[in-house]
Every structure is written in structure tokens, then in C-alpha cells.
Image: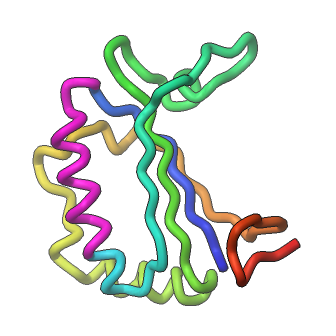
Amino acid sequence: MYVAGFVIPVPEENLEAYKAWAKASAALFREYGCLEIVDAWEDNVPDGQQTDFRRAVAAKPGEKIVLSWQVWPSRTEMEQAEAQIAKDSRFDIPVEIPFDHRRLILGAFNPIHTLGREDGTS
């Protein structure tokens, strides 16, 4: 298992547009072997004293934080998919996406502990 994570600032008024975009994107990632995708809309994201999600993505007033992750079978399979995705015109960034993609944070991680998965690592 390999996990890619994202923190994304999305204008609050773009919730429905984001949901539609996420659903369409997830279908494409599934074609390339992604096992699971979760997009979670901000519900309780407190301001921190030193840092927080909002400051991390330079969120503007009226933007909500989306926490998203993708579960892939392995780093190798994710990287192979990324190489294929780069050539797939369906992944070209459209003129209008429901967030500022330049401010999202992304990273990929090797799980060191999971709960609730048969293939978990502990």
C-alpha cells in the first residue's frame, strides 16, 4: 500500500463543482489502478498558534480546506500510473477548475500503521 495525500484550498461556493470534479477525476485514477480515493470537506479545522492547514496552503477568506488521499497498491504502481497519466489528455488541467491548484500541498507516504485494512502494516 502507498498513500498520496493532498491539502487543497477550495472556495466555499465551489463545493458542488469540486464534488463533480473529484468524482470525474476519481473514475480516471481508478482506470490507472488507484484503489481508493477520499475527498473530505472541512468541518472542524481550527486555527493553530504556530501553523495549521489554512496557513499551509495560504487559504484566503471564504476558502474551505479539502483533505484528500489516494491509496495505491505500491509506489511503483503509482509512479507507473503517473507516467501514463501525463500522456492522457483527459488529465489536462482545464481552464476552470474549482480551486487554485498552485496552492495545494501534496506528498506520498509509506504507511507505518493502519487499522481496519487486511493488508495493513504495523
Image location of residue 95, percent across then percent down:
11, 48
Q: Is the residue 121 above or below the residue 115 in the image?
A: below
The quadrant of the rendering that contains the N terminus is bottom right
Q: Residue at x 50, y 44 (%)?
A: 67
Left or right, 45 with reference to 59: right
Asked which quadrant contains residue 15, the reply is: top left
Left or right, 104 with reference to 117: left
Q: Residue at x 47, y 27 (%)?
A: 43
Image location of residue 18, percent across then percent down:
24, 44
User: Range of the magenta residues?
Assistant: 12-27
Image location of residue 53, percent across then percent down:
58, 29
Closer to us: 2 or 76:
2
Q: Residue at x 21, y 54 (%)?
A: 21
The quadrant of the rendering that contains the C terminus is bottom right
Name the residue at the right extreme. 122
**Any magenta on residue 118?**
no
Q: Is the residue 65 above or below the residue 25 in the image?
A: above
Asked which quadrant contains residue 73, the reply is: bottom right
Q: Residue at x 22, y 81 (%)?
A: 88
Image location of residue 14, percent across then percent down:
20, 32
